[in-house]
Image (cartoon, rainbow, N blue to C red):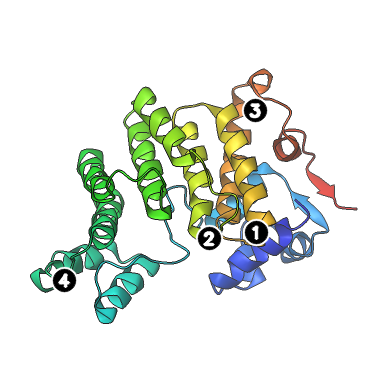
Amino acid sequence: MDNLGDILKEARQQQKLSQLETAEDICSQSTLSEIEHNKYIPNTQLLINLCERLSVVFDDLTLASNFKICKEKYFNQKVSYFYKHNEFDELRIFLNRPTVLETVQTSKQTQAYYFYLAVCSLKLDHKFDNAKELLKLSLASAGHSRKQTTLTRLGNIALGYVYARQGLKTSALRQIELSLKNFPKNTYEENLNLIFYMAALSYFQLSQFDNAIEAIEQGIHYITENESHFMLINSLYLMANIAKIVKQKNAQLAIKNYDLFNIFIHERAYEQVN
């Protein structure tokens, strides 16, 4: 938690917001400044409010780097642009163009193509059955290789999230386990940060808070040991929301002794950092 202020500052700067704009109706600018300089740790509700102001969302499937759907550089750049700017309506229209579809040729390209369509469905329609079928098509395109690519892991965890949203516990847990199976230790891609976050989010949907917290802490360790910040703010936001719910339900006894979680659960109004 020593770098929470750095993480919040980075997220604020990415949103191109000043400290004053970020703090308005939430806290004083001086308080935000002290948080960003790691002089104070915000309590649960303050962190939640700041994350919401910074447009942090739960179902964030933002990619650190995009996948190619074809060999045409221009088409791949368009997909990357639409995805990066959350223009999912435009992305789906673009992907459904015959001129684009006919350039999708290899199994890897087909897998990426259906993955992007599935995310569009999740973002635009909230029709889980449609997204589920598109994710299955994406995974089927990957073949039966024992070694999972990053995109295959993302497809598996995204499908697990969909099952969790539908309340299909057994199917969700199976997909989460599959996405984390033989997780690579010697190679690193920033998109892999999403696996732990989406696993935690899926457990959260199933009200398995203990598993969600464990996945978040594993993810934060994985991210920081690889000197990345990608998905850190989302992980902290999810952790704070879990802490809020656990305290409201007085369910502390169901939670193991996690270091990061205890910062939220045993917080004071503001805790000074030494």
Which of the 4 image quadrants contains residue 228? Answer: bottom right
Q: Which residue is mark 4?
A: 103
Q: Which residue is mark 3?
A: 247
- Mark 3 or mark 4, earlier in chain: 4
Q: Which residue is mark 2?
A: 190
Looking at the image, residue 87 lies above or below residue 172: below
Q: Are marks 1 and 2 in contact (CB under 8 Å)?
A: yes
Distance CA(mark 3)–CA(mark 4): 52 Å
Q: Position of residue 182 (x, y in %)?
A: 51, 41
Distance CA(mark 4)–CA(mark 2): 27 Å
What amino acid does circle 3 point to? Lys
Specify whether 173 is left or right of 25. Answer: left
What amino acid does circle 1 point to? Asn
Distance CA(mark 4)–CA(mark 1): 35 Å
Please name the residue shown 34% across and 28% down the image. 171
Specify whether 5 is left or right of 104. Answer: right
Q: Which residue is mark 1?
A: 226
Please name the residue shown 32% across and 77% down the image. 77
User: Which of the two residues, 260 or 20, is positioned nearer the viewer here?
Assistant: 260
Q: Position of residue 175 (x, y in %)?
A: 39, 34
- For label 4, the crowd category at 10 Å Cα-Cα, with few meaning under 14, some 14 to 19 and many 20 or more, is some
